[in-house]
Image (cartoon, helix red, strand yellow):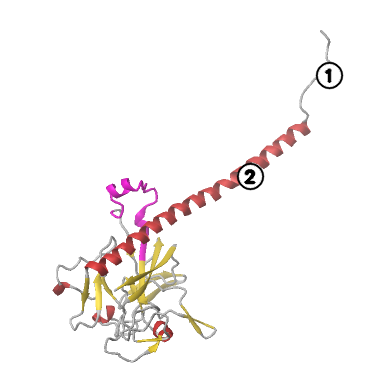
Amino acid sequence: MRQRSGDEGFTILEILLAVVILTVGLLGLLAVFPVAMRSGKQAVETTNAVIITQSVEQAIREGLRERKRQSADGKWTYFIFSHDGVVDPLPSSLKTVRTDGDYYILLPSPNPDGKSKMKRSDFYERGKIFLFPESDGISWEVDDVGGVREVEDGTSDKRANGRGDPTKADDDGDDRKISNGYEEYETYDVRRVYRLSNRFFDAEWAEDYNVVDDDPINQYSFAFSIRSAMQDGSLGFDYPTDVNLIPAGDLYEVDILVFRSFREGTTSADPIYETQILVHR
């Protein structure tokens, strides 16, 4: 056997270089974990928000189809909204319907006695926006930086839904922002929400759709706004493309807003998901 000329091994420099390479690789790998966790959380959040939105849309269409009612004078239209998050007991008859109940959804209908034509754009821009759940006449004490402040809604008549008269109801779009002389409808100043409970996902439904409630659904809530649509029908049989019309109050835009960890009485809350649908009266 031949004897080796020198001992074999790693030098300090080689060990340090290997450690540096290993550390850089591990740091790059660890940096991926927060991004992956955040993306996974957002995906679950968006999925839940979409499911909630679809459920609310179905409840609104069902209310318009099966629980639509007329006011005592026959002028105005409302419907009963039945969905998880509605707190007030649903009325058993017309005599027990309360205009301030959170199930009472009043449509911002045009005056049926009006017979003169108007510009479609004016009808749309000047039309009222109703936000549900209704918050007129309700005040909160909200913790703010530097103390407690009072937040009050419904500064016009402080009567929920104008007691069933849309001409007397408060315009919940009064938080419009004026920018360069134009009114913008970027957001709604939501003060109340329908809070979901663990009853939203029943066991049978969750099994059918393979839903795993890893994200507590009771942290989610929603609200929605209703306004007359630009493409509303006309009592004068004008086409939707015509500039002028006699509003019929047939078609409505509904914006559904989904929130998470909403604090009641707060202002300028940002929804985690928002979508718009068109519904027919």
Mark 2 touches mark 1? (CB < 8 Å): no
Looking at the picture, how far across and down is residue 235, in whole percent? Answer: 31, 84
Q: Which residue type carries mark 2?
A: Gly
For residue 159, which quarter of the picture? bottom left
Residue lying furthest right:
5
Q: Which residue type carries mark 1?
A: Gly
Q: Which residue is mark 2?
A: 28
User: Which residue range is magenta in the image?
Assistant: 199-222
Q: Dividing the image into 4 quarters, which one contains the C terminus?
A: bottom left
Looking at the picture, how far across and down is residue 182, in whole percent? Answer: 50, 84
For residue 63, which quarter of the picture? bottom left
Residue drawn at (31%, 47%) of the image: 208
Q: Which numbered circle lies on residue 72? A: none
Where 12 sits versus 258, above or below? above
Q: Secondary structure at mark 1?
A: loop
Q: Dividing the image into 4 quarters, which one contains the N terminus?
A: top right
The reply to whether the magenta stretch includes residue 205 is yes
Where 29 sits versus 148, above or below? above
Q: Which residue is mark 1?
A: 6
Q: Which mark is in front, 2 or 1? A: 2
